[in-house]
Amino acid sequence: QVQLVESGGGLVQAGGSLRLSCAASGLTFSLYTMGWFRRVPGKEREFVAGVSGTGGRTRYADSVKGRFTISRDNAENTVSLQMNSLKAEETAEYYCAADRTATIWSLESQYDYWGQGTQVTVSS
């Protein structure tokens, strides 16, 4: 079955950096658009970034443009999210997700598979 496993979360001071990774198995990875989402307790999950199957197209939420970078390695079946200049309000559970279509959706309902999440805590 499809598995997405996130790693790399942790505690960081505001202004610091973290790199999240997501390892995928059980799917033909290069055929899937991959996305990163985050959820603060009590709020809906929100789109952070997405990357097309080939890695040639990316999409970012306005709030993270210029600070976050999504990338993928189709040989290793991984997708990463480099997060720089982190803010306290970006404390959240971060999830990776996979979508079989070519569109980089920002809607979570469009994604077929989800990881369990990794916690990122940004201290102010």
Image (tube, rainbow, N blue to C red):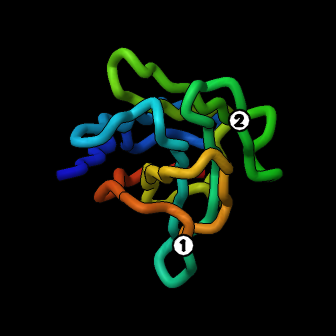
Q: Quadrant of residue 107?
A: bottom right
Depth order, front residue of 102/92:
102
Q: Is residue 40 above or below residue 9?
A: below
Kind of element beneath mark 1: helix
Which of the numbered marks, if any, corresponds to residue 58?
Answer: 2
| Residue sitting at x 45%, y 30% | 30
For mark 1, what is the residue? Answer: 109
Q: Is residue 34 left or right of residue 27?
A: right
Kind of element beneath mark 2: strand
| Residue sitting at x 37%, y 15% | 75
Find residue 79 and report its horizontal and vertical position in percent.
45, 32
Q: Quadrant of residue 56?
A: top right
Find residue 71 and report its horizontal and vertical position in percent.
56, 26
Q: Is residue 97 visible?
A: yes
Q: Is residue 88 above or below residue 17?
A: below
Q: Is residue 101 above or below residue 31?
A: below
The kind of residue on which mark 2 rests is Thr
What is the count of numbered marks? 2
Decide: few, some or many residues near mark 1? Use Cα within 10 Å; few <14, some 14-19, many ≥20.
few
The kind of residue on which mark 1 rests is Ser
Depth order, front residue of 113/23:
113
Find residue 33 and report its horizontal and vertical position in percent.
54, 43
Decide: few, some or many residues near mark 2? Use Cα within 10 Å; few <14, some 14-19, many ≥20.
some
Q: Is residue 121 visible?
A: no
Q: Is residue 78 above or below residue 100?
A: above
